[in-house]
Image (cartoon, grey):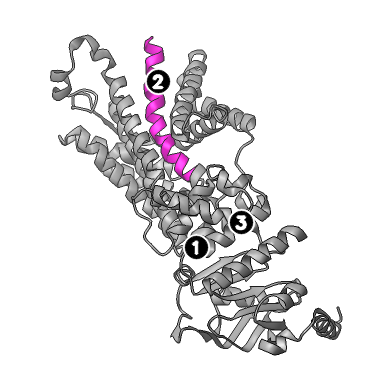
């Protein structure tokens, strides 16, 4: 039972990250590698603030804001400096490594006794002791659902329509008298905000910030999005956002199962092989607009 | 209305592949005119449209709309006043969004795309009404994705979407070229009707000489970055497809085609 709960918890935290990756990879058609940097960015900011006694719930918002800023940087590098999408992400990812170290001060910040969103005086006083074992799960489910619902709502707004249009057909956005570059930057900002938020949740969950925790984050995000959108595609009653969250849980379950037979050193290899398997099964990226006239 | 003054445009300047497309090119389009532009490949028709819309920069010269200089204005800014339909039917719509969402997007052109609801429910009846004018049955499937429509249906939608909001100019870039003859005919009739209804100033590039003769109030033939034929009003009415074809052939022979 603990085993199941732990991969659901981790899956849903990575699900928030996957929601961000869904925006860049599926909606914007922008393979954004800066995710590997913004995930630990959210974590380093959170760890630093929590060690200094800031309210853990407030750190979620701050982490989101910092992620938004990083996303804007990736967007500006891509749009204004006209650097290709992959390279813009790699540049940001590399730069963020140092920035994360600077923010955290060291490569590893433990939070053993500090209050987190999962364990604090306020929760202790309102949650009956009988279900205290499920507080983490409850908290993560609530946060993931809030993110999903907000994103569903946003995608139905005019701004959300424009975001979907720009990845689909950026010529049309220009025809609608809107600067397509700005729309892309907006999308990257929201996406990386969500990723940093997931980073913040993850470091409070693990009670530690580690500089290398971002390595492979983009792979987990991509795998979740692809599992969610292609394997669950046939179940049309699922919104894509729900499918992505579920995809992340399925993916973490696969990793957890694989890890039972292996040692933690094998994690990244298993992660990579699973992504490959998912890609092969689902036939990879969709075709761009221009090719299906 | 629209003035292109002394336009110079070099492609690949400073290299062995340097090509001078426009050298002192001038064109004036009056309000309400429907200009058909014909010419061989590489004669500068599409480049001219791109220059008007701001898709490609010019080396020197000026572009004026209603006596206002827009030469330095960005492409997306100019599009507030311009509607454009491309040769590729996929360029005018979003395939992964539904017909209704596409119509809503187009309906909001010129306004801000903020956090209000993307589709205004009160407008759905209006969208259905204008879709029903196409006689393609699209009004009954407004919740299906545009990606599953045929090229002709998409082009009809693109045409509707680009003329939905008040615009000063309609730019048609070989917008029937990718369609089968029957659909092309249908789209051309629709184009003509929309232009008349909304009294739009239009520039249409086409390879179909018959459309150029049949439709529009003015005919221009371009060759190597210049207008070699420019007929309007009665002069144009009296021209036949044969006349245009003859001239077209003469030019082509000069080039050794």
Q: Chain of mark 1?
A: B
C-alpha separation, residue under disc 3 versus residue under disc 1:
14 Å
Q: Position of residue B68 (x, y in %)?
A: 43, 84
Q: Chain of mark 3?
A: B
Instruction: Looking at the picture, tell me which residue is in the foreground, A199 or A128.
Output: A128
Q: Which mark is residue B7?
A: none
* Residue carrying label 2: A8
Q: Which mark is residue B164?
A: 1
Residue A2 sits inside the magenta stretch: yes
Residue A82 sits inside the magenta stretch: no
Q: Is residue B201 above or below residue B27?
A: above
Instruction: Looking at the image, tell me whether mark 3 or mark 1 is earlier in sequence order.
Output: 3
Q: Quadrant of the C terminus of chain B?
A: bottom right
Q: Secondary structure at mark 2?
A: helix
C-alpha separation, residue under disc 2 versus residue under disc 1:
48 Å
Q: Position of residue B106 (x, y in %)?
A: 48, 58
Q: Is residue A80 above or below residue B257?
A: above
Q: Is residue B129 above or below residue A264?
A: below
Is residue B113 something that shows in the picture?
A: yes
Q: Position of residue A40 (x, y in %)?
A: 35, 38
Q: Are marks 2 and 1 in contact (CB under 8 Å)?
A: no
Taking the spot 41% from the left edge, 44% from the top edge, the residue there is A155
Q: Residues within 10 Å of mark 3 (few under 14, many from 20)?
A: some
Left/right placement of residue A23 relative to residue A196 reads: right
- What range is drawn magenta here? A1-25
Q: Which mark is residue B134?
A: 3
Looking at the rendered image, the disc whose residue lies closer to the viewer, 3 or 1, is 3
Taking the spot 61% from the left edge, 37% from the top edge, the residue there is A284
Q: Chain of mark 2?
A: A
Whether labels 3 and 1 belong to a single chain: the reply is yes
């Amino acid at each position: 039972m603990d085993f199941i709960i732990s991969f659901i918890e981790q899956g849903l935290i990575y699900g928030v990250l996957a929601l961000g990756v869904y925006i860049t990879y599926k909606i914007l058609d922008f393979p954004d590698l800066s995710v590997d940097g913004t995930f630990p960015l959210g974590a380093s900011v959170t760890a630093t603030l929590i060690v200094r006694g800031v309210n853990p719930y407030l750190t979620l918002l701050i982490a989101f804001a910092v992620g938004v800023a990083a996303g804007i940087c990736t967007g500006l590098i891509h749009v204004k400096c006209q650097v290709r999408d992959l390279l813009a992400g790699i540049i940001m990812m590399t730069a963020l490594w140092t920035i994360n170290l600077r923010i955290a001060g060291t490569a590893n910040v433990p939070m053993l006794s500090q209050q987190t969103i999962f364990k604090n005086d306020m929760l202790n006083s309102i949650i009956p002791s009988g279900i205290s074992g499920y507080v983490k799960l409850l908290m993560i489910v609530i946060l993931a659902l809030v993110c999903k619902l907000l994103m569903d709502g946003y995608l139905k707004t005019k701004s959300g329509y424009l975001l979907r249009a720009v990845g689909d057909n950026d010529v049309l956005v220009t025809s609608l008298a809107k600067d397509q570059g700005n729309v892309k930057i907006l999308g990257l900002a929201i996406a990386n905000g969500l990723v940093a938020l997931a980073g913040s949740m993850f470091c409070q969950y693990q009670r530690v910030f580690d500089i290398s925790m971002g390595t492979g984050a983009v792979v987990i995000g991509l795998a979740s999005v692809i599992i969610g959108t292609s394997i669950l595609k046939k179940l049309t009653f699922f919104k894509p956002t729900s499918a992505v969250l579920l995809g992340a849980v399925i993916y973490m379950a696969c990793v957890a199962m694989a890890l039972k037979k292996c040692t933690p050193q094998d994690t990244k290899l298993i992660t990579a092989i699973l992504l490959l398997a998912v890609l092969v099964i689902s036939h990879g990226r969709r075709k761009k607009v221009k090719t299906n006239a | 209305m629209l003035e292109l003054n002394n336009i110079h445009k070099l492609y690949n300047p400073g290299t062995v592949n340097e090509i001078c497309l426009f050298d002192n090119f001038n064109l004036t389009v009056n309000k309400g005119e429907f200009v058909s532009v014909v010419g061989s490949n590489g004669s500068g028709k599409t480049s001219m449209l791109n220059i008007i819309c701001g898709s490609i920069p010019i080396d020197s010269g000026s572009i004026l709309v209603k006596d206002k200089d827009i030469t330095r204005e960005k492409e997306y800014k100019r599009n507030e006043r311009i509607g454009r339909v491309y040769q590729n039917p996929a360029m005018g719509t979003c395939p992964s969004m539904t017909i209704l969402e596409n119509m809503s997007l187009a309906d909001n052109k010129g306004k801000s795309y903020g956090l209000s609801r993307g589709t205004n429910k009160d407008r759905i009846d209006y969208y259905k009404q204008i879709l029903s004018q196409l006689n393609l049955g699209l009004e009954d499937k407004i919740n299906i994705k545009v990606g599953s429509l045929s090229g002709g249906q998409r082009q009809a939608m693109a045409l509707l979407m680009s003329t939905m909001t008040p615009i000063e100019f309609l730019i048609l870039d070989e917008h029937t070229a990718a369609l089968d003859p029957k659909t092309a005919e249908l789209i051309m009739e629709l184009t003509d009707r929309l232009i008349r209804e909304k009294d739009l100033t239009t520039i249409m590039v086409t390879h179909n000489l018959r459309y150029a003769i049949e439709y529009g109030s003015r005919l221009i033939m371009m060759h190597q970055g210049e207008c070699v034929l420019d007929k309007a009003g009665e002069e144009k009415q009296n021209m036949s497809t044969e006349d245009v074809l003859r001239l077209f052939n003469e030019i082509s022979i000069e080039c050794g085609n």
